[in-house]
Amino acid sequence: MTVVSDSKPIIWMRPEKPARGPAPAHSRGQIAAVAIDIADSEGIEAASVRAIAKRLGTGAMTLYRYLPAKEDLYTVMIDEATGFEPQEPTGDLRADLTTLALRRRQIFLRHPWLAPLLATRPIMGPNFMRGMERDLAVLAGCGLGMDDTVHVLNLIHSWVGGAVQAELTERATAQQSGLDRHAWRLRMEPYLKSLLETGEFPHLSQMVQASEIGEADERFTNGLEIILDGIEARFPTAAGTDGSRRPVGDTGGGAPSARGANGQPTARSSTTE
Amino acid sequence: MTVVSDSKPIIWMRPEKPARGPAPAHSRGQIAAVAIDIADSEGIEAASVRAIAKRLGTGAMTLYRYLPAKEDLYTVMIDEATGFEPQEPTGDLRADLTTLALRRRQIFLRHPWLAPLLATRPIMGPNFMRGMERDLAVLAGCGLGMDDTVHVLNLIHSWVGGAVQAELTERATAQQSGLDRHAWRLRMEPYLKSLLETGEFPHLSQMVQASEIGEADERFTNGLEIILDGIEARFPTAAGTDGSRRPVGDTGGGAPSARGANGQPTARSSTTE
DNA sequence: CCCTCACCGAGTACGGTGTACGCGATTTTA
DNA sequence: TAAAATCGCGTACACCGTACTCGGTGAGGG
């Protein structure tokens, strides 16, 4: 029988301390910390192997004693930056989900490179797993069943990821514009003007001059509220609503928008005509 | 006086056809198409300048006559892949938003590299702008005001971006696992097992063995339904609900989760249990 | 106790990337 | 027809991740 067992184990199964030789001068955590520091301040692409090694006062190839490939560096960075903070379930689904989402957003904002990396690869680091376990426990503590929990968590995570990503892009653009404010406007202005002047974009130009977009924080929480409305409606818990239960995947028969957002009478005349 | 006007114009303002010299052998669109083709089949990182040039049967540096930097190649790729399809507003907010979201998802699924690129830079290409204008028009056609339109569109776009990104990662993992199914499991299995065996992850292990996650399509539409519930509740339109209107940012009083998610009476206990 | 061998740190080197520069050929304008 | 503008593109450089290789270090087994 062909022995296939030489498939290299995942980074997390590698023991940190060697059995025999001299003690390593560094550690995965230390390397990850330096990399995170660089990535936070100069961008993820500045966190090259050589740059990290230079900061550590060591040779580039030395790092490969700790991390077999660049991808593993990312893996460890992600898990390190993700960190772990416990969260006690209050039993109030809305409150708990809000806490959960806001924390997640904070982490992403603290490390602008994290969201893109996290979004494009499967993550199974210990910190990440602990966070997952915590989130599951929190939702279970709110009275949700396992299936609902998974759905809700998925929904929240996706939304936070998407929203924060948009926010980060906007922030990056703005801050580049902060250093280069003049140049940026100078580059974009004529193009935008030429576009809007074609008359093909009536709504867009109206938006540009009319709409106040508001602060990022505010927009995030507003969006979250709306999603929570939807969640609470479909997954009622002890701390919430009546016992009526509509399972996932059921839009509610023909009438889609069943509910008034707040306690309103909901004199619903949905989608008539 | 220092002339600042030498800040290079955005790629979209560069005229395609030169005024004087010999006719170019290629075009931005052609280059972008080739790049998209490569990126679709071999991944975005395979779409290197040299690789594209080789496919075009030309020298690498030739491409720089058309696109001043790699970043501009991305810009053009994004706009090309985004494309543009008109959409007539039906006046039904829910239906229109669904159409809009599903289409957006389809585009992202067709070009797996698109979502990550789109998410990390500001986009102003003509196709993208046309799409934005169309979306604004659609929502306006549903009776939403400008501010609400912007909020709703933001919410939907963020959600679609986040959800599709998660879906793509999962798909990429699965397909790598398709080629390498054995190796992948062999790598991950022992680690996962060792983690779960610690007993620190009761909910996680329960999830692993109990929960059916369901198809991606289904999950997407389910999530969308929930969000649409929230949106319809807060932004009632002619085709929708009662006239009660709660402005953005108002949770409905001091108590965060104080509200019955759906109006109690609302006899409609569809699919109760 | 010392030998041995696993392991460390790190230099060198290779194939890849994006792209600055420069040169000769080609076409349009004056 | 001369001049100007633009094209295709080869060469070269800095930077990237990393395979290979080496001599030095220090703990374990005899």
Image (cartoon, coloured by chain):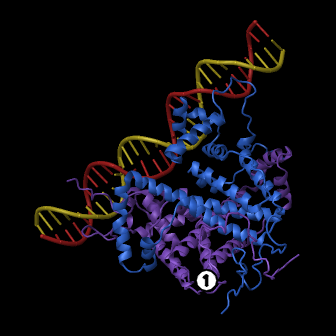
Chain colours: A blue, B purple, C red, D yellow
Identify the secondary structure beneath mark 1: loop
Quick one: which residue is furthest to the right in this view? B273
The residue lying toward the viewer, choosing from A12 and A80, is A80
The residue lying toward the viewer, choosing from B176 and B56, is B176
Circle 1 crowding by C-alpha within 10 Å: few under 14, some 14–19, many from 20 = many
The residue lying toward the viewer, choosing from A89 and B191, is A89
Q: Give coordinates of residue B4: x percent, y percent.
A: 27, 56
- Whether residue B215 is visible: no
Amino acid at dot 1: Thr
Q: Give coordinates of residue B65: x percent, y percent.
A: 35, 61
**Left or right, A27 with reference to A57:** right
Q: Quadrant of residue A185?
A: bottom left
Q: Quadrant of residue A145?
A: bottom right
Rendered view: A236 above or below B95: above
Chain to which mark 1 belongs: B
Rendered view: A65 above or below A213: above
The residue lying toward the viewer, choosing from B35 and B76, is B76
Q: Give coordinates of residue A172: x percent, y percent.
A: 48, 55
Q: Quadrant of the C terminus of chain A?
A: bottom right
Q: Residue at x 74, y 24 (%)?
A: A20
Tell me the residue that label 1 is attached to.
B237
Rendered view: A202 above or below A138: below
